[in-house]
Amino acid sequence: MSDCNHNCSSCGEDCPSRQMTKEDFLEPANAYSNVKKVIGVVSGKGGVGKSFVTASLAALFAKQGYKCAVLDADITGPSIPKSFGVTNERAMGNEMGIMPVESKGGVKLMSINFLLDSEDTPVVWRGPVIAGTVKQFWSEVVWGDVDYMFVDMPPGTGDVPLTVFQSLPVDGIVIVTSPQELVSMIVKKAVNMADKMDIPVLGLVENYSYIECPDCGKKINVFGESHADEIAAQFNLPVLAKLPIDPKFAALVDAGKIEEVDESFLKDAAESIKASLDKNLQ
């Protein structure tokens, strides 16, 4: 209609805009990309180790022989290059598109830091520009053949998660949380957003779950009792892993050696993710 204000919630007309499907919003992938599975890694709040889980899963899948990639959608707080030790790399382009940076372990990476003058250059952009950049990382980057792409999203339920859910063919998401009771409310928001966007939740990963005493082996709940099982049960979701606080992890990430972390604590999570994706495709 000529006087349409594009606010469907206040309109009763049965126009073509109302009849658009989820596929109509998808951004086309680069012509030279063949990405089989896309997994979003999200968190309701910052500081829970979402990027650590993203990078660790990608490194683990790569060690298992899969072709993996990480799309760093956390434009204002990118940490993927630092984790993989490629902070001095710059993404180059040609007539095919933008070429991703590759880690030592063969994981293909794209982050805004690969396009900036230096890693400490701030990104002071408004939401629509940031969301547009994320779409460009999907449509203009030459990903090639990828079995599993992990998308490291910024915390919360704002512009970028919405853009990823609408514009990328996300097969499922992993929600990263921490033990505090307050987090349960925030996790519920992330689950409810995924449900509204018709994106399967593959499960929860609880980070900072405990610290193990080096002398007696006792597990100490530094941030209080875990609420992961309780939250997961409410939504009939699996708890994929409960990760410890381990100074060795932090030291390796700071040194850009995420691929040297012992990811055995995520092996069960990886198998569960693969099984859930296969089930969803049936």
Image (tube, rainbow, N blue to C red):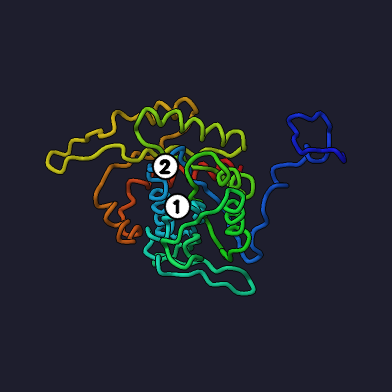
Q: Secondary structure at mark 2?
A: loop
Residue 216, by quadrant, is top left
Q: Which residue is rendered at x = 62% and y = 50% of the image?
A: 128
Three-letter amino acid code of the residue under disc 1:
Gly
Circles 1 and 2: CB atoms closer than 8 Å: yes
Around disc 1, counting alpha carbons within 10 Å, would you say few (fewer than 14), some (14 to 19), or many (20 or more)? Answer: some
Q: Is residue 38 above or below residue 33?
A: above
Q: Which residue is rendered at x = 67% and y = 53% of the image?
A: 27
Rendered location of residue 63, percent (x, y): 39, 59
Around disc 2, counting alpha carbons within 10 Å, would you say few (fewer than 14), some (14 to 19), or many (20 or more)? Answer: some
Q: Is residue 221 left or right of residue 199?
A: left
Q: Which residue is rendered at x = 46% and y = 40% of the image?
A: 43
Three-letter amino acid code of the residue under disc 2:
Gly
Q: Is residue 127 above or below residue 258?
A: above
Q: Is residue 35 left or right of residue 103?
A: right
Rendered location of residue 223, percent (x, y): 29, 33
* Closer-to-camera residue (147/79): 79
Earlier-in-chain disc, 1 versus 2:
2
| Residue picked out by circle 2 | 46
Q: CA distance from mark 1 to mark 2?
A: 10 Å
Residue extending farthest to the front is 124
Quadrant containing the C terminus is top right
Q: Is residue 228 above or below residue 156?
A: above
Residue extending farthest to the bottom is 94
| Residue picked out by circle 1 | 77
Q: Secondary structure at mark 1?
A: loop
Rendered location of residue 25, percent (x, y): 69, 47
Quadrant containing the N terminus is top right
